[in-house]
Image: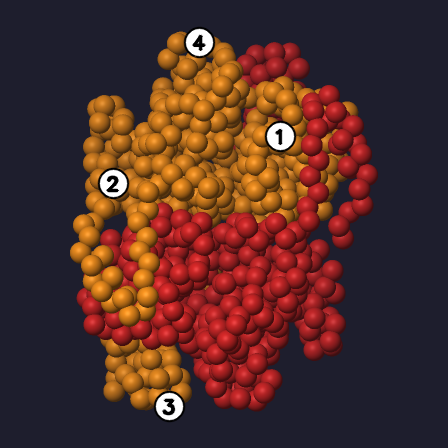
Chain colours: A red, B orange
Amino acid sequence: MKKDCLVCTGCHKEYPLDKIFPRCDNCQEPLEIKISLSQRFNKNRKISSESILEHYAAFYPFPWIDNQLSLQEGFTPLVKVDKLARLLEIDNLYLKNETVNPTWSFKDRGTYVGVQHALSSGCNYIGTLSSGNMAASVAAYGARAGLKTIILVSANMPLEKLNPILIYQPILIRVQGDYGQMYYESLKIGQEQGIYFLNSDVPFRVEGSKSIAFEICEQLDYSVPDYVLIPTSSGGNARGILKGFLEFFEGGLIKKLPKIVCIQLAGCAPIYEAWIRNKDRITPIQEPQAIDNAIANPFPPSGNELLRKLRKYEGLITTVTDNEALQGQLMLAQEGIFAQPAAAVSVIALQKLKKEGIISKKSYCVALVTGAGIKYTGILERHKFNVSTGTLPELNKIIRTRLKELPLY
Amino acid sequence: MKKDCLVCTGCHKEYPLDKIFPRCDNCQEPLEIKISLSQRFNKNRKISSESILEHYAAFYPFPWIDNQLSLQEGFTPLVKVDKLARLLEIDNLYLKNETVNPTWSFKDRGTYVGVQHALSSGCNYIGTLSSGNMAASVAAYGARAGLKTIILVSANMPLEKLNPILIYQPILIRVQGDYGQMYYESLKIGQEQGIYFLNSDVPFRVEGSKSIAFEICEQLDYSVPDYVLIPTSSGGNARGILKGFLEFFEGGLIKKLPKIVCIQLAGCAPIYEAWIRNKDRITPIQEPQAIDNAIANPFPPSGNELLRKLRKYEGLITTVTDNEALQGQLMLAQEGIFAQPAAAVSVIALQKLKKEGIISKKSYCVALVTGAGIKYTGILERHKFNVSTGTLPELNKIIRTRLKELPLY
């Protein structure tokens, strides 16, 4: 028997490594792998425990940084997705997977920076106004920092969506009234009661988002993608990502800027509406109709600024429908990434822009996957999934039949 | 005005960095941070894009490794939790946060290794029998690898829990019958139809788990914790983690072994029951009563082997109740980590063993947080959370009242 082998944990009988049946043929106990350590392991090539603020310290010159608070937000995978690239007929496609952040969305980057600014400003309380991802993120980091945390949500938000925020035990208030007005009211109350409201447009939250751009550059070895596709709601994340590319460009680390492509849902696209009408200012959407609140801010606080920046740096903005977002969710899942519908719009936008000839086949594209699908499982009922049911004696036949089904792509 | 400042994105008016109100006092547009790049950024100190199989290649001498499949599973944060440590009266406490894996549980490590072994063995199909986390993980990696994937679940699993598995579009079958028998039936059908069933005890899945031990050592700079606390269901993960420490020990990378502490839920604790009765073999639990299926395998395939290993290496095993698991969930959330109840048992066990004098105050402890709480939001209704509701004009007063509430800890 060669050195590397399978060995029974019970009777120690040995088997070759290519045995598939996982138990011992002799005593039925589980097997384990016995390996001979031939290569030397390099102890010095250590995995990093830095926070984004440490790693990119040159671009975060803030004296008040406390890395003890970090939950190791950021440093998310840039996943090459060749199967999806073939489907969309794009030569090079990567997904920046923000669903593996500590509260499973990109919001943690900005919250991490913002909470520290709040602490440095002597605030004992933090807060946010949010429809989901930002609420969970602020509640989590507020708890970790030992700060009392005020979370304001719209009164029509279903109670079941509140529990994953309440688990961090913030002070959660469901507010009856106009969402746009709520934003200004939160700032007023914040000033009066000393609460730092970490909303989407807070400059230090936008600073957190710029690390997404830094990481993309670094993960692509300082080559720059042609297009970066960003699901866009309040506009703060797109602002931050563009700012990150600009700072790396000004710092001489990259040689060009990517084109930023913002994507909104057709049922709530205030920035897109202003863009196509050549307006300078956002008009609030009166009755937003969107499958996922995370991408449905009817009056985005960074909307005007994002319009200015998209025009200045020749960005693009487009929309996709609710059903297309669901389709995008299925496409991403075929690469093993389960995105919320809000986060799945970027691949659909890419598909459309490719078909329209705006993005060419040979482009290098990075699509941002902003948040996890596991957060919004109610939506999944809109997919028509096929489930079989049967008894143990029927199982063999059911499997045989279903294996003959045609593949997806 | 000093160089680093806030600047209005609209009218370019400048403000000091400690301004908290996030909009321009002049034109109400959002502010952004203007920084002068003084420090040089070191391009060579790059964040890693290695997979666990690349980074620990010395311990994974398999010729068939294909890192293209990686979703960058593993390399999860080891978070120092001083607030929780004070509460539990333990000097040094870390949480190994497996909730930020690609499908939000530790299962992805073993699935990643196992799928590659399946591919190398020429299997066109993979499968698993699971009550949740493993099903999602195998479905995700199966999709990414382009393999047809068979997921078997118990017929009493609610449909709403199936959608987060079905999103990856596996062949999902709800099976009526005994869960323990289902396991053996799956292996039989697998042999007959050429399906590689990646169940919990597959040796290559166990290999994936050993990277958890490697990472803990590396993240603690090759000092070794006194105790590693592991929520235990089928026993495969605990086997893998212990194997990892043993291999680092044999390879001369660490000087001692930690004590492994396995934790089961009181309502389904077959390994614990055999342990306290000094038995060599597991007896199946007839009517498991547990809050979270992820830690409730009534007949754990690696149970006998885990008993052998815990005895040989002087490990411990204990139980906690469902209500205690929910309490653990609240404790972890105060450090910003939202764990599923199955994953929250380790801190409760630590608290108990500390009170019983078995674990001393000066110990170095690592508690494993195996999977994300966001997966099981139905359970959260058992927490009694306080939610306020009010109109915009009432908001100021509601916040003022609730801020007077006493803190949690």
Identify the disc placed on residue B85: 2
Q: Residue at position x 51%, y 68% from top?
A: A296
Q: Residue at position x 54%, y 84% from top?
A: A274
* B55, B130: nearer the viewer: B130
Q: Are marks 3 and 2 on the same chain?
A: yes
Q: Between disc 3 and disc 1, whose residue precedes?
A: 3
Name the mark nearer the viewer: 3 or 2.
3
Q: Residue at position x 41%, y 70% from top?
A: A179
Circles 3 and 1: CB atoms closer than 8 Å = no
Find disc 3 in the rendering and name its residue.
B11
Name the mark nearer the viewer: 3 or 1.
1
Q: CA distance from mark 2 to mark 4?
A: 35 Å
Q: Between disc 1 and disc 4, whose residue precedes?
A: 1
Question: The disc numbered 2 marks a residue on which chain?
Answer: B
Q: Between disc 3 and disc 4, whose residue precedes?
A: 3
Identify the disc placed on residue B213: none
Q: Secondary structure at mark 3?
A: loop
Amino acid type at circle 1 is Ala
Amino acid type at circle 2 is Ala
Find disc 1 in the rendering and name its residue.
B155
Find disc 4 in the rendering and name its residue.
B279
Q: Are marks 3 and 1 on the same chain?
A: yes
Badge 1 crowding class, 10 Å Cα cut-off, few under 14, some 14 to 19, many 20 or more, is: some
Q: Secondary structure at mark 2?
A: helix
Q: Between disc 3 and disc 2, whose residue precedes?
A: 3
